[in-house]
């Protein structure tokens, strides 16, 4: 992912993608983000957003890496950060 992919930072998260034929999602939420309840909430929101808005994401392998700041965002703010990062990533890949 690091050599052939493209990454953008967002509010409380980082989104990286390696273009390809399929559409896969990886979610990384380390223990430094918070306890299990917080980490699972973030993963649920990311999965649901990807399921509903997969057309906004570039085709290929995408990885969402949550940072500790993500724990302080509510669900709507987290969705907004994902939308913004996906938009910036798609722009970066097309330019």
Image (spheres, rainbow, N blue to C red):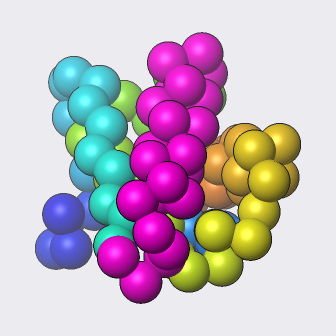
Give the residue at x 64% y 55%.
85
In magenta stretch: residue 40: yes
Q: Position of residue 56 (x, y in %)?
A: 61, 29
Q: Nearer the viewer, residue 45 or 82?
A: 45
* Principal secondary structure, stretch drawn in magenta: helix
Q: As drawn, is 57 to the left or to the right of 60?
A: right
Query: Dividing the picture into quarters, in which one does residue 5 lie?
Result: bottom left
Query: Dividing the picture into quarters, in which one does residue 8 lie?
Result: bottom right
Q: Which residues are magenta?
A: 31-53
Quarter the C terminus occupies: bottom right
Check the image and report above or below for 11 versus 84: below
Q: Position of residue 53 (x, y in %)?
A: 61, 21
In magenta stretch: residue 46: yes
Q: Position of residue 38 (x, y in %)?
A: 54, 58
Give the residue at x 49% y 76%.
33
Q: Does the image show residue 84?
A: no
Check the image and report above or below for 85 versus 54: below
Q: As drawn, is 87 to the left or to the right of 47?
A: right
Check the image and report above or below for 29 versus 90: below
């Amino acid at each position: 992912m690091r050599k052939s992919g493209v990454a953008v930072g967002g509010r409380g998260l980082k989104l990286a993608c390696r273009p390809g034929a399929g559409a896969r999602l990886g979610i990384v939420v380390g223990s430094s983000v918070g306890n299990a309840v917080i980490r699972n909430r973030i993963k649920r929101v990311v999965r649901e957003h990807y399921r509903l808005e997969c057309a906004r994401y570039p085709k290929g392998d995408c990885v969402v890496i949550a940072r500790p700041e993500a724990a302080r965002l509510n669900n709507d703010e987290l969705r907004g950060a994902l939308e913004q990062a996906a938009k910036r990533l798609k722009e970066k890949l097309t330019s």
